[in-house]
Amino acid sequence: MTTQQKPILPERVFDFDALVHEDRVHRSLYTDPAIFDLEMTRIFGAVWVYLAHESQVPQPNDFVRARLGRRPLIVVRDSNGVLRALYNRCTHRGATVCRQDRGSAKAFQCPYHGWTYLNTGKLSGVPWPEGYSCDFSRPEFNLMQVPRVESYRGLIFATLNADAPGLIDYLGPVRRPLDEWLDRHPGGALEVREANRLKFNGNWKLLYDNSADGYHVVFSHRSLLMMENRFQEGDGKGMSYYKDSPDTGPVKLYSFPNAHHFKDKRDAIPKRPGALWAIEGLHPGMEHYEAALRRDFPDRADAFLDLASSEPVNINVFPNLHILGNHIQVSEPLSVTETATTWYGTAVVDPDGELGDALGPVNALRMRTQEQFPTFGEVDDLANFEQIQAGLAAEEDAWIYMHRGLGLPERYSAAGDGTTIGPATDEVFMRDYMRVYRRLMQTEPNIAPTRDVS
Ligand code: FES
Ligand SMILES: [Fe+2]
């Protein structure tokens, strides 16, 4: 059974042509709770949203909690192995039925009055049913669930929109950098490990606006760069490619269809084994692991160390997935001025034993990269987001500019697949994604959750 959700209360009407221009957007996109509410249906209800990684639910009955916009979900591999995204919302009076972040369960019992649901979402038991006159086998009493849940190479996405394109089409050309990131290790299998959980007092789009921004790096991350520079000799300093004239350097910005984008810093790294490790930021214990790998694997140590190093990419899949370094970063809007952002570490999986005894040290180092940018750099960005939110309290100063590069077509080249390629510090990605945002905010999606357990 599908249910078309119609708003019951009248919505305020917004003119998004007036709020989103080619060169600027209105502050209310970041400050108005009514626009935020609309985004939860017209953005997060309309497109494919990243929920979790398959390694978090490897076996039947495994589950992990997630959110689709504000909707609390249980991402579960049901007892038959089917991936589902169940609403974590009891059909009775609305309580969450699952209050554990992850685990394994064949059924979920609501802690309030004990209604129990199988991990397919089907209602399986109601205490003292003789007190009811209804037929509980009717689907309306099953947990609601997201109708379309799909995995792209382990990355689980879901959409509520019956009319959304297929996931492969939605991703489009951003699949190339995603594939390359996954295939750093042949086979590309990853496991998500523990996470660095952060929250900021700012709108969720501030994070997306910044996710391919090469303009801020040397200013906002100055202390991190200075720290790295104290430990590194010569030109190979961390993020040194943003110095001097970054727009004529090797860093490129890719703006893809459907509001995805990608900042590629890989060409700034010399093409030789060990070059990526050579610029890896300092983190405690790295010298010990490096020495052990060089001692035990003298011929392959550089390759192993490169596999442990932070890949110099920022891959951004609208609206909430960011892949950078060795991390999968997920953002979750909580309110118009609050956003959660979680950085999951990733470990290489080596089913054929190709890495041998190097697997442990490589994965330990990958986890330690959590102590580099995700710890020392992300806080700079979150401080900016909170300060933008504070600045946007000024009602009369209404516009946010994003016109760097506008009117300078010589800065761009185009790939045939709808991709625009620009220089490192350009804001073309922001203009492109805001154009998609405007179209989505002007369209009512065909939101069709289901209670079908088949
Ligand atoms: S709210 Fe869940 S059983 Fe009553
Ligand atoms: Fe940053």
Image (tube, rainbow, N blue to C red):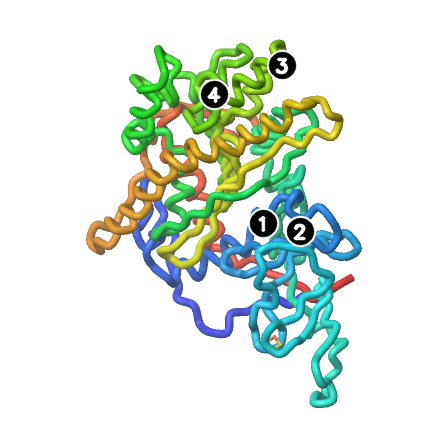
Q: How crowded is mark 2: few (under 14 residues within 10 Å), some or many (20 or more)?
A: many
Cα distance, mark 3 to mark 2? 42 Å
Amino acid type at mark 1 = Leu
Amino acid type at mark 4 = Glu
Which is more foreground, mark 1 or mark 3?
3
Q: Circle 3 — which element?
A: loop
| For residue 340, side relative to residue 110 (left or right) | left
Q: Circle 2 — which element?
A: strand
Image quarter for ligand 2 equals top left
Q: Residues within 10 Å of mark 3 (few under 14, many from 20)?
A: some
Do residues under tags 1 and 4 come within 8 Å of each other at their CB atoms? no
Q: How crowded is mark 1: few (under 14 residues within 10 Å), some or many (20 or more)?
A: many
Q: Circle 1 — which element?
A: strand
| Any part of residue 258 in sight | no
Residue denoted by label 2: 149
- Residue 390: horizontal and vertical position, in percent? 25, 51
Residue denoted by label 1: 51
In front of the other: 43 or 233: 233
Cα distance, mark 1 to mark 4? 36 Å
| N-term mark: 1 or 4 | 1
| N-term mark: 1 or 3 | 1
| N-term mark: 1 or 2 | 1
In this rendering, is residue 152 above or below 294?
Answer: below
